[in-house]
Structures are given as C-alpha cells and as structure tokens.
Image (cartoon, rainbow, N blue to C red):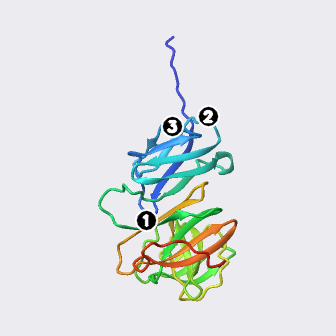
Amino acid sequence: MEKTLVFTHRLDFALRLVDTTSGRNVSARDVTVLVDGEAVHIGEKADGVMVFQNLAKRAFDLTITSPSFETAKTAVDLDAQGKGLPLLEVHMVPGARYPGGVEFWTLCGVMEGIESLSAVRMGENACLIREFDPRRRMATVFNPHALALDRVRYALVDPDRSVFEPFRIERLVDRQTVKTDRVLEMPYKNYFPITPEICGVTRDDGSFCLRVRDDAAEAKWLVRWVKDGEEHFKTVDFKAAETPSLEERGGG
C-alpha cells in the first residue's frame, strides 16, 4: 500500500501594512518582518495582505522594516485577538527614502514620555457628522460628495476648540452611515468634520516622527499626542513654521 504524506500549515495571523499618508496598502516587497528580533517568512495575498504560518510564539514583539518607511514596532498577543484569523493593521510612516518624488511636511523631535502621535488636516469639511447612536455605535454623516470612507482610522474634529477624537470605522453601512469601533464621547455639532487620521511613530527613547503630504494649498494640521497618559493638541502651519515642534498646550 502506497504511503501518502500530508502536510498541514497553521495560519497564525494576517498583517496589512498601510501608508498612513495615503491610506493605500504597502506591498510586502522590500519589507522585512521580525518576530522577537528574528525574520519570518511572508506570504502575500493578491490584495496585499500578508499571511504568516506556523509561528512558534503566540505573544511577541513585531518589528517591520522597509527602506521606504520608518521602522514600526508593536506588541502582539494572538490569544487576545478573539476567534478566527487575526488581521492586524499597522500604519507605516513614510521615510526619508520614500520613492516617487512625493513631497512631505515633517515634524520630528524628542519628547520624554510621548506615547502616540497623529494629526488631521485642518479645514476639511467634505464629510460632517449629523447623528450618533451610542447603543449601536452608528454615526450618520453628511457626505454630499459620496466620499468612499474606505480608510480605517478617522477622527471627529471640533474646530471650535481645535481638538479631535480618533476612532476606527468597523463597517461602512452605506455612504451616509458608518459603524465605529467605540462610543464617541466628544460633544458635537452638525458642522463637525469627520476626516482621516494620519499616524506618526513614537519610540521608547522619546523620539517621534510625523509626516504628512504636501499636496494642498494650505498646510495647517491639527496634531494630537499623548504624553504620560494625557492628550495634548497643537495647530501646526507647516508653511509658516520654519522648524515645527511640539509645544504642550494642555489637554483637550
């Protein structure tokens, strides 16, 4: 009787890398992924999602390097991801060697205790909040230009106080209704914009870096950072500031 060998492969998790400045997926080409400092094999699906098989660990530090992006690091616990194949999304910050001649505004520096960093473009009002149902986590929006709303990270912006509340879109019900990952807590009025959130990178040594695209007439951005558990905001006009920096203006 002929013997048949059967090989099985366990899919551990899937990874989507996103260029935070454009919302587009990052290809696995020229990307290295390390699990606790050791490089692992990357399998890439047609939609740009990377898959990983037969990992020896369920909890580890994930490091992603690429010549086109700043190094990204995140802690992963696959057992805490719930049932099914975990899909992790990591936003990548373009680096100094980003290809294609794209121009960026850059905000980099060092701040002890900084934990996270992000920004939204000021003056955008193409999509406005109308209602929010906290029980169902459903936001009704005014979206007259039928924006795709196909990113994951967005923010509800209070232009009166120059603050914003980040959230994720879990599901697009239709062009006027989205399901959020959390209950929005910030009081709002019907002229408050919903706009993409651009992520920066922060490191254990206190260094940080944020890059946004130089693709509009205005270059005013509202920057949010968390330091020692407290959020702070600052409006940065990249065209007016020769060397933009973070200056603590107080909590939002």
- Numbered disc 3: secondary structure: strand
- Numbered disc 1: secondary structure: loop
Q: What residue appears at the point 39 percent right and 81 percent down from the top-left corner?
A: 218
x, y percent for residue 208: 54, 61
Marks 1 and 2: which is nearer the front?
1
| Label 2 to label 3: alpha-carbon separation | 13 Å
Q: What residue appears at the point 57 percent right and 36 percent down from the top-left corner?
A: 10
Check the picture and name the quadrant holding the C terminus: bottom right
x, y percent for residue 37: 56, 39
| Label 1 to label 2: alpha-carbon separation | 33 Å
Q: What residue appears at the point 61 percent right and 75 percent down from the top-left corner?
A: 248
Identify which amino acid the numbered label 2 is placed on: Ala
Disc 1 and disc 2 in contact, CB within 8 angstroms: no
What residue is pinned by disc 3?
Answer: 39
Identify which amino acid the numbered label 1 is placed on: Thr
For this orientation, the residue located farthest to the top is 1
User: Mark 2 vs mark 3: which is more N-terminal?
Assistant: 3
Instruction: Using the image, determine if residue 19 lies above or below residue 212.
Output: above
Identify which amino acid the numbered label 3 is placed on: Ala
Does residue 100 appear left or right of residue 95 in this picture? left
Where residue 167 sits, quadrant-wise, is: bottom right
Instruction: Using the image, determine if residue 61 lies above or below residue 250.
Output: above
Label 2 neighbour load within 10 Å: few <14, some 14-19, many 20+:
few
What residue is pinned by disc 1?
Answer: 21
The reply to whether residue 154 is in sight is: yes
Query: Residue 56 has which mark?
Result: 2
User: Mark 1 vs mark 2: which is more N-terminal?
Assistant: 1
192 vs 21, nearest the viewer = 21
Marks 2 and 3: which is nearer the front?
3
